[in-house]
């Protein structure tokens, strides 16, 4: 491992720890004595994505994260949620054990997770992924989210007063009149 500070080719390992998907090592350069961290991860077999125009390109998690970040931009989501979704999708894709996956499978996985997470992010992603031709198709998609069979998604905003206090406050107001 080359030192990132001076470029020297040799270093010693000071500490090793298991992390989620590999090993984290703290190293010290034998020349400049600077310390740095390296990660070792098992590299899975290559996974190729079959695009709509039949092209094949290697799966790129960064492209997946980019699409998720654009869809979830300025949404009140817990920290790390987007990375967790990308990690889950990547694990599921490699878990399928196939060398090639259609891009539609990945898009559907993203849609499914965003629909459970945040309706606005879901609509943003769907509008690009499904390439809505006109506003009526978009309206139908939004109406499907608003239908009574779909449970509303929390916006992480707390009510000003608990429901019980609202009922009690309403009763007090009627008594005063």
Image (spheres, helix red, strand yellow):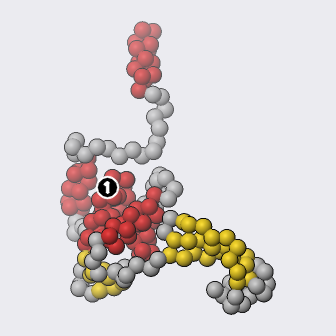
Q: Residue at x 37, y 81 (%)?
A: 45
Residue in the image at 76% along x and 85% along y: 30
x then y, percent, for residue 55 = 27, 87
- Using the rendered view, name the quadrant where residue 39 is placed: bottom right
The residue lying at 45 percent from left, 45 percent from top is 156
Q: Nearer the viewer, residue 8 or 118?
A: 8
In the rendered view, would you say 48 is above or below 89?
below
Front one among 76 and 101: 101
**Left or right: 82 in relation to 4:** left
Residue 120, image quadrant: bottom left
Q: Compared with residue 57, is residue 89 higher up or lower down, i.e. above or below?
A: above
| Residue 42 relative to residue 99: left or right | right
Q: Quick check: 151 left or right of 30?
A: left
Measured as percent of width and height from the top left, residue 152 is found at 32, 44
Which residue in the structure is indicated by mark 1? 115
Is residue 131 in view? Answer: no
Taking depth in this image into account, of 126 and 48 the one nearest to the observer is 48
């Amino acid at each position: 491992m080359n030192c990132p500070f001076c470029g020297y080719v040799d270093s010693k390992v000071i500490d090793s720890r298991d992390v989620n998907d590999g090993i984290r090592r703290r190293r010290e350069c034998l020349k400049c004595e600077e310390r740095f961290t390296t990660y070792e991860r098992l590299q899975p077999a290559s996974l190729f994505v079959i695009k709509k125009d039949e092209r094949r390109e290697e799966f790129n998690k960064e492209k997946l994260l980019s699409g998720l970040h654009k869809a979830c931009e300025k949404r009140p989501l817990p920290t790390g949620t987007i990375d967790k979704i990308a990690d889950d999708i990547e694990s599921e894709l490699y878990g399928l054990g196939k060398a090639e996956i259609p891009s539609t499978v990945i898009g559907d996985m993203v849609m499914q997770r965003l629909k459970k997470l945040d309706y606005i992010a879901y609509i943003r992603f769907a509008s690009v992924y499904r390439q809505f031709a006109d506003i009526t198709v978009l309206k139908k998609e939004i109406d499907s989210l608003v239908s009574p069979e779909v449970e509303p998604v929390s916006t992480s905003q707390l009510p000003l007063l608990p429901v019980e206090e609202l009922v009690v406050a309403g009763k007090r107001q009627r008594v005063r009149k």
